[in-house]
Image: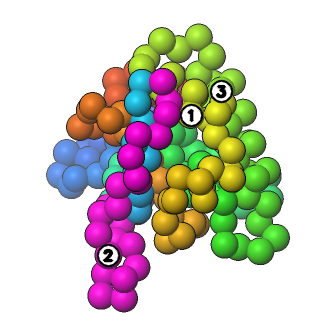
Amino acid sequence: MTILASLNRAYDRLALQVDMPEFGFAAQDIYFCIILDAQGNVTDKPVQWGVDRKNKPLARTMNVPYYGGRSGSNAPPYFLWDNSAYVLGVSNKKDYDAVNRFEIFKKFHIDMLVGESDEGLLAVTNFLRNWDPKNFVKFSFPEEMKDRNIVFKLDYEYNFIHERNESLKKWKNI
């Protein structure tokens, strides 16, 4: 048996004993959720899971598609989630070029989701096609949202878009 096969078997055994994300996913702190309709329009204020004693946003740990860490100014985006610089093109960090990161996130998703018919994936694609970072102020999104991890959800569903069957299939086939 190869080393990789042994490691894979060990991971599978561990996953049966401990609540851990499956391969290709990681538990990440998510602070906000953007609510979309089927056409990709923002329908409500972003969902926030509360605040701590210092009035800072509380995170909710979620298993999200993940390929590992990243670094550099042209770091690749994550699939169907990321921080506000990538998802919305806004950040409090100086010299971070959030608009460029948003364009990278947008192109990545539009290219990857071409031809998809899943309502959730289409909603994200339409959102990204129509989003302008100036909308952050227009929609009165909270300043605390900047530089925090964000996911998407359809307004009529309980699950998040990255949890939909078609999203999972797409990620596993990348």
Mark 1 → mark 3, Cα distance in angstroms: 10 Å
Which SS class for mark 3? Answer: helix
**Image coords of residue 59 (percent x, y):** 36, 66
Q: Nearer the viewer, mark 3 or mark 2?
A: 2
Residue at the front extreme of this rendering: 138
Q: Within 10 angstroms of label 2, few (less than 14), some, or many (20 or more) residues?
A: few
Q: Quadrant of the C terminus?
A: top right
Among the 4 quarters of the image, the one containing residue 160: top left
What amino acid is found at the position of numbered circle 2 in the picture? Val
Which badge, 3 or 2, is on the more N-terminal residue?
Answer: 2
Which SS class for mark 1? Answer: helix
Q: Within 10 angstroms of label 1, few (less than 14), some, or many (20 or more) residues?
A: some
Residue at label 1?
Answer: 127
Among the 4 quarters of the image, the one containing residue 95: bottom right
Mark 2 → mark 1, Cα distance in angstroms: 27 Å
What amino acid is found at the position of numbered circle 1 in the picture? Phe
What amino acid is found at the position of numbered circle 3 in the picture? Ile
Residue at label 2?
Answer: 51
Which badge, 2 or 1, is on the more N-terminal residue?
Answer: 2
Task: Report if residue 54 lies within the magenta region.
Answer: yes
Residue at label 3?
Answer: 110
Among the 4 quarters of the image, the one containing residue 137: bottom right
Residue at the bottom extreme of this rendering: 54
